[in-house]
Image: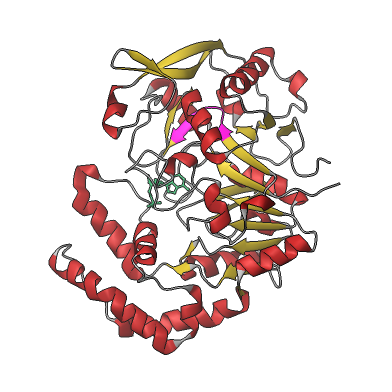
Amino acid sequence: MKKKNIIVVGLQWGDEGKGKIVDLLAKDADIIARYQGGNNAGHTVVNGDLSLVFRLVPSGILNDKKICILGNGVVIDPAVLFEELDALKNIGIGIKDRFFISYKSHIIMPYHKRLDIARERLRGAGMIGTTGRGIGPTYEDKVARLGIRAIDLLDRNLLYAKIVLSLKEKNYLFKNVLGENIFNPDDLIEEYLVYGEKMKEFLIDSSAFINEKINDGFNIMLEGAQGTFLDVDHGTYPYVTSSNTVSGSALSGVGLGPTNIDEVIGITKAYTTRVGEGSFPTELKGGKGDLIRDKGEEFGSVTGRPRRCGWFDVNLIKEAKRLNGATGMAVTKLDVLSGLKKINICTGYMLKGSFIDHLPYSHADYSETVPVYQEMSGWEGNISDIKSLKDLPVNSQKYIFKIEELTGLPINIVSIGKERNQTIILKSILREG
Ligand code: IMP
């Protein structure tokens, strides 16, 4: 039986419940790697009384047989990293020889965070609603060839020179444009050398490591953070994150070629949510939106911000299917919709008098889109402990099959509660022959 290599991506605006699904699929993967983003992500995994939020470390780390990697495409805040590693130690999870970081990954520095927050303030009403974790400015420095890579933390002279170079423009901005305090490289260098010393044992060439392991018969799951429509190229620009979140980026984000991938699994909620600013055609303001937020506990796991909630949007998922080359789908939080008399599925939009079955091309058009809905009948009762699809209320089955039909994406998994066992597997993913 061939062990498959898969990519798991969010099909919406993030927070699709990837943590739980990745945790579930991790049992059949030897290696779990993240390829982009940083601690703007937040994966919650619930196991019995234990509820853990991972912002950086792949959630597969809870399984002590697995190798977990932060690839070169990830940006790392060392303070957050060591906080998470300490938390794992405190609950008895060992990471020796099974947690690694690409030496090429970029480091989030305190000036990136300050820049992120000050820029948002400068934007005023046009703010992106970033997580304020310094993600954007860190990727900017990477592309501007000013970034600090994990390996640089091991070399005092190099690190110092790089900090000085990076601060040349930034200190000017802080002082003269943003009205912020400037940074002195001497105040940063010691702290970051200590991080380097602590990080040293984890540093690898993720590309060489992963390719070698695959040749030895190991399989890999590449775990996306955020979601398709936060992708810097394909998302609802400019209200996006600063990395490519789609599956194509998984490969460059760890150093793997496309011929190694067997499946791309997309995760979607049974409805839609978004945090931060930006367009959201099926958003429900008040009423049912509030109901879904409360019942689904839709508050950001990183920032605690209330998530905006709305109906399931077929346009999003069809486009995400294409952008990611998705081969299957996991639908999460179906249980949250229980008790609603009527549930809408958005099948397309009206824009300037015409029906469109894709996302608007210009951001300016979003405010004019009017969703077209297909109304479905709801179902009653708590469905979280049901074990098979055929035992779900008939209307919830109809809802699931309608989503599958309209998106054209086969459903592999339906999640009906937070716990690992509150999951219905329709088709296995990682171990088919
Ligand atoms: P940044 O990634 O902090 O620069 O934020 C850019 C946008 O992406 C904001 O709208 C954030 O709310 C959103 N975002 C970033 N990470 C996540 C995530 O993990 N889930 C959902 N939204 C996110």
Residue at screen point 27% across, 75% down: 167
Q: Position of residue 381 (x, y in %)?
A: 64, 19
Answer left or right for 9 relative to 391: left
Against 138, residue 409 (above or below) is above
Q: Residue furthest right?
A: 1
Q: Position of residue 113 (x, y in %)?
A: 34, 63
Taking the magenta stretch, the answer to whether it contains residue 271 is yes
Quadrant that contains the C terminus = top right
> What is the image's colouring?
secondary structure
Against 385, residue 240 (above or below) is below
Query: Considering depth in this image, is 217 or 82 the residue closer to the camera?
Result: 217
Residue at screen point 77% across, 37% down: 428
Query: Considering depth in this image, is 258 or 30 the residue closer to the camera?
Result: 258
Q: Residue furthest front?
A: 259
Residue at screen point 64% across, 39% down: 418
Write down the region rendered in magenta: 268-273
Q: Main secondary structure of the magenta part?
A: strand
Against 412, residue 382 (above or below) is above
Q: Position of residue 162 (x, y in %)?
A: 36, 79
Q: Quadrant of residue 409?
A: top right
Q: Quadrant of residue 240?
A: top left
Residue at screen point 61% across, 27% down: 334
Give the total number of marks visible in the rendering: 0
Query: Considering depth in this image, is 205 or 128 the residue closer to the camera?
Result: 205
Q: Position of residue 177 (x, y in %)?
A: 14, 63
